[in-house]
Amino acid sequence: MQVRVERGQLIIQVVTED
């Protein structure tokens, strides 16, 4: 899971790796 702040918004990306 990646957490980053972009344009003042909290962006959470969930990456599933088998």
Image: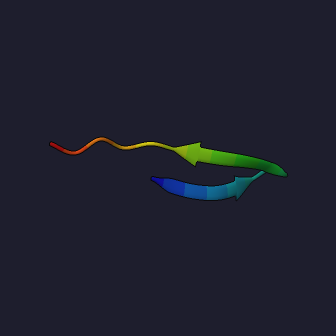
Camera-side residue of 9 and 18: 18
Q: Position of residue 13 (x, y in %)?
A: 51, 44
| Residue at far left of view | 18
Taking the spot 36% from the left edge, 44% from the top edge, the residue there is 15
Please give the name of the residue rendered at 63% of the width and 58% of the height, measured from the top-left corner. Answer: 4
Q: Locate residue 13 relative to residue 10 in the image: left or right.
A: left
- Across and down, in percent, residue 12 comes to 59, 46
Residue 17 locus on image (x, y percent): 22, 45
Q: Is residue 6 left or right of residue 8?
A: left
Quarter-wise, where is residue 14 in the image? top left
Q: How is the image coloured?
A: rainbow
Image side of residue 18 versus residue 10, left or right: left
Q: Name the residue located 29 percent from the left edge and 41 percent from the top edge.
A: 16
- Please report the residue visible at 74 percent of the width from the left and 49 percent of the height from the top: 10
Quadrant housing the C terminus: top left
Q: Total number of numbered labels?
A: 0
Q: Residue furthest right?
A: 8
The answer to whether 4 is drawn above or below residue 18 in the figure is: below
